[in-house]
Amino acid sequence: MSISVKNISKSYGKVQAVQNVSFEVKEGEIFGLIGPDGAGKTTLFRILTTLLIADSGTAEVDGKDVVNNYKEIRKNVGYMPGRFSLYQDLSVEENLEFFATIFGTTIEENYELIEDIYVQIAPFKKRRAGDLSGGMKQKLALSCALIHKPKVLFLDEPTTGVDPVSRKEFWEMLKRLQQKGISILVSTPYMDEAALCDRIALLQDGKLLEIDTPQNISKRFPTKLYNVSSDNTYQLIQDLKSYKTMHSVFPFGEWIHYTDSKKDFNPKDLLAYLKEKEHTAIVIEETVPTIEDTFMELSKG
């Protein structure tokens, strides 16, 4: 296993950031930590990259204990924190050379590993890092995290605040890195990115809700799910929440996702209710649950 986490807990005063979390990441796997802000993702990353010590539990990275072997781990992992943390006053080229020097290597020695990424920022290699766009900063940070040829790559919400095109390009780069045998632990609040991982762990308030492939997690949605819409979305949400057998109501793009507590629920009954509430252009149709729907359902429990 590239990463092994067993019963890790961490608190900050009275705030329990991580509660008894366990999971494993296989060699060459893209494993996602999925959850909203405050779920405990960054705390786990800091523990695994030897920047924090857990209150209880154990963790290993590349077969080495994160407390007893922290120096060896730091030599063999790449870490890209959520906030851009490179030297803003140094150029692209200077940042990359600096990180290569820290790890006792050169850009030339491991260039094949970052070539696909670096060619996109090479035209701006003399530009200061602080003057780069969000997508270019992201590519530079990833290049610096890879320059010493790490065995395990930690990416803490790497695409937050980045445009959709750059997000897509970034994940294409991760897939290519995976093919080179690098194990990747990535955290994200974006459910569409969760679907691109081999396996995911759903986190909420520091607790582990579920671990499995994105496809299997979506299949575990416990009931039928319906897309509902009408001419008045705001009022529709209020009326659906007031329906006598309502189980859950969540806005989802142009639709409202609705589930009912009755096993023999008939959409025609809901349609009649909404017509009584003077809604028009009503649409009620069964739909396929997503990871986000499953996460919301698990969070209710």
Image (cartoon, rainbow, N blue to C red):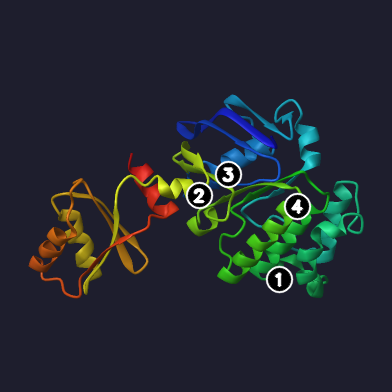
In the rendering, at what x and y percent does residue 170 appear?
A: 65, 62
Report which residue position mark 4 lands on: 145
Q: Choose top left, top right, bottom left or bottom right for residue 4.
A: top right
Quadrant location, the C terminus: top left
How far separated are the C-alphas under marks 2 and 1?
A: 37 Å
Helix or strand or loop: what does disc 4 sit on?
Answer: helix
In the rendering, at what x and y percent does residue 118 appear?
A: 79, 65
Helix or strand or loop: what does disc 3 sit on?
Answer: helix
How far separated are the C-alphas under marks 2 and 3?
A: 21 Å
Report which residue position mark 1 lands on: 131
- The residue under the point 59% across, 60% down is 159
Identity, as a three-letter code, of the amino acid under mark 4: Ala
Mark found first going from the N terminus, 4 or 1 = 1
Identity, as a three-letter code, of the amino acid under mark 1: Asp
- Residue at the extreme left: 276
Mark found first going from the N terminus, 2 or 4 = 4
Helix or strand or loop: what does disc 2 sit on?
Answer: helix
- The residue under the point 70% across, 27% down is 67
Left or right relative to 283: residue 96: right
* Nearer mark to the viewer, of 2 and 4: 2
Report which residue position mark 3 lands on: 42
Q: Residue 49 carries which label?
A: none
How far separated are the C-alphas under marks 2 and 4?
A: 27 Å
In the rendering, at what x and y percent does residue 115 appear?
A: 82, 63
How far separated are the C-alphas under marks 3 and 1?
A: 26 Å
Mark found first going from the N terminus, 2 or 1 = 1
- The residue under the point 90% across, 46% down is 104
Report which residue position mark 2 lands on: 214
Helix or strand or loop: what does disc 1 sit on?
Answer: helix
